[in-house]
Amino acid sequence: MPVQIILGAQWGDEGKGKIVDHLSEHVDIVARYQGGANAGHTVVLPPGKGKPEKEYVLHLIPSGIFHPRVTCVIGNGVVLDPVALMTEIKQLKNAGIKVAGRLLISHNAHLIMPYHKMLDAARERGEEKIGTTGRGIGPAYIDKYMRTGIRVVDLLNRDTLCKKLKRNIESNNELLNKLYHSQSLNVEEIINEYQEFDRKLDEYITDTSEYLNNALKRKKRILAEGAQGALLDVDHGTYPFVTSSNPTSGGACTGLGIPPTAITSIVGIVKAYSTRVGNGPFPTELNNETGELLRKTGGEYGATTGRPRRCGWLDAESLRYSIRVNGIQKIAITKLDVLDEFKEIRVCTEFKVGGKKLTHYPTDSQTLDAVEPVYRTFKGWQTKTSGIRSYGKLPKEAKTYIEALGKILGTTIWMVSVGARRDQTLIVR
């Protein structure tokens, strides 16, 4: 294993945080390679030594932070919100979790500035909203690719920071004033605020690409943690209803500064049904009592925004596309226990348009909005699975469902999750 990639194979919210936390026990480094504070990775620590079960929601710090021997890396592909990061660090420290010496942040990571959040929120109030979290992610990536972005390393030089800030604020001030009817943003206040962030974060900043490549030479075991899901990839997702980065496996190399030759394993995280947050096509969405039951039973509300997630049956057609684009070798299925109540469970096995079967997965929203899902129905098990601790003890119907998924998807089902805690993870093979 030098590098194993853990990515969401659907539209995000598949439970990557739980799986990364589970796997972190056996690695040395967990490195986040893209996205920003728009991603919420939930980790539930089991009770022990007189302490109750505890839930944490991380937005930037990798999910391996709860294992004391693991070093966590925020790579150059992440857009960093210092406000969110400082809040997260404080939360962990207050919980008695050591962060100093265990968290490394790329000096080349781009920063989310106050005007990014303002621009993002303003767009989502308009007619062309796509359902973003409003955390400034898109505008920060726009600046990055316009080559006008501000990186962590820019905080070291006040003159450089001032020059870049003035240029960026001036280019956006007319729009911001129009939208918010406010006075111009104060450059000096922002500089002072962000240089204070720099002083607080200085101990964590380094050349993380060099660190990771040196770790590879020493045969260290690395997990690359993605945010969001492959179907939200800006290049390969359901454009334009996508995120602003590359959650697909290829994003791990550019987002961390490591070579493709270091990647030895790619694991896709798949929820036992489908969910989506925000706008965009969702062929298997259930706008009925069944969809509401999935949402209620699964607690399907965004970890970052609290928004209710759209829910539907598992979409194997989309997953086969995701497996192909990412080179996924094995799959971890999460939230199987959410299906415990259902008498029957359905899986979309193919798409039709105008009565004709599609021979490939359409990534354009117009076609996806028009597809008709073709379903295969499975008998439900209607037995509680959250207390089961080995795959062999799952109900026969649950194993039939899981093994059929492996055949439908043409890949290996590696593990199954029947709850949010580490000990609720079953190894299939």
Image (cartoon, rainbow, N blue to C red):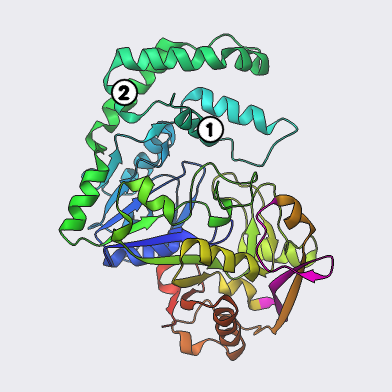
Residue 10 locus on image (x, y percent): 57, 60
At x 68%, y 77%, the residue is 341
C-alpha distance separating marks 2 and 1? 19 Å
Q: Is-magenta flag for residue 372?
A: no
Left/right placement of residue 313 relative to residue 31 reads right
Horizontal and vertical percent for residue 394?
Answer: 53, 86
**Label 1: which residue?**
136
How far across and down, in percent of the image, does residue 199 sit?
27, 26
* Identity of the residue drawn at 44% across and 82% down: 428
Along the line of sight, which residue is nearer the eye, 160 or 82? 160
Q: Secondary structure beneath disc 2?
A: helix
* Residue kind at label 1, given as amino acid type: Gly
Query: Could you tell me the amino acid type at mark 2?
Result: Leu
Q: Quadrant of the C terminus?
A: bottom left
Can residue 342 be found in the magenta stretch?
yes
> Most extreme residue toward the top, as rendered?
183
Mark 1 residue element: loop
| Residue stretch in magenta | 341-364
Q: Which residue is mark 2?
A: 155
- Asked if residue 420 shows in the view, the reply is no
Q: Residue at x 48, y 82 (%)?
A: 388
